Image: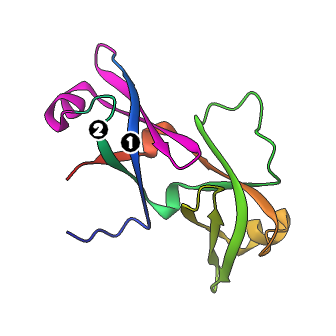
Amino acid sequence: MKISARNMLKGTIENVTEGAVNGVVAIKVGDDVVKADITMDAIRDLGLAAGKECVAIIKASSVMFAAGSERIAQLSARNQLAGTIVEVKEGAVNGHVTVELPGGARVKGSITNEAIDALGLKVGEKALAVIKSTDVMVGVE
């Protein structure tokens, strides 16, 4: 199957924190951990457990960026992935920014050209890809 989401990060589940309705799945992707807040029904249906291989799936429109590599304190988004910008493509209104993480995985986001310029996002610069855990889907083979 092919999907339209630009980000498919392969990894291994570190742990699953179960709740009454939702749970949090922590996925080790290279040197980073991506957290997905998904329903307990999905966790059970997919057989998600520590050690299982999976894919964190994230739409480009769900990725926000911050300049620099320092984590932002007091922010509710669980995923703050630091890396280096490897591509910036500006369109008529929106552009795509791609950040490569230290482990080699890449995260692509779609933001306005105005935001790209205001943040000074350029190839070779450090940036944080910021993603809410509720915007991360989990897939298994």
In the shown orientation, is residue 40 left or right of residue 27? Answer: left
Question: At x 79% / y 49%, what residue is drawn?
Answer: 69
- Where residue 28 sits: x, y (%)? 48, 41
- Where residue 18 sits: x, y (%)? 33, 17
Circle 1: element type? strand
Q: Is residue 26 magenta?
A: yes
- Where residue 23 sits: x, y (%)? 35, 24
Considering the image in quadrants, where does the N terminus appear?
Answer: bottom left
Residue type pointed to by label 1:
Thr
Residue located beneath label 1 in the image = 12
The quadrant holding residue 138 is: top left
Circle 2: element type? loop
In the shown orientation, is residue 68 left or right of residue 54? Answer: right
In the shown orientation, is residue 61 left or right of residue 128? Answer: left
Read off the magenta span: 19-47
Residue type pointed to by label 2:
Lys
Residue located beneath label 2 in the image = 52
Q: Which of the pair 17/132 is nearer the observer? A: 17
Position of 71 relative to 104 (above/below): above
Q: Are marks 1 and 2 in contact (CB under 8 Å)?
A: yes
How dense is the environment of label 1, judged by Cα within 10 Å: few (below 14), some, or many (20 and up)? some
Question: At x 18% / y 33%, what residue is drawn?
Answer: 47
Q: Looking at the image, how many numbered discs can be counted on the residues?
A: 2
The quadrant holding residue 124 is: bottom right
Q: CA distance from mark 1 to mark 2?
A: 6 Å
Q: Is residue 7 magenta?
A: no
Question: At x 80% / y 74%, what residue is drawn?
Answer: 122
- Where residue 14 sits: x, y (%)? 42, 31
Q: Which of the pair 28/114 is nearer the observer? A: 28
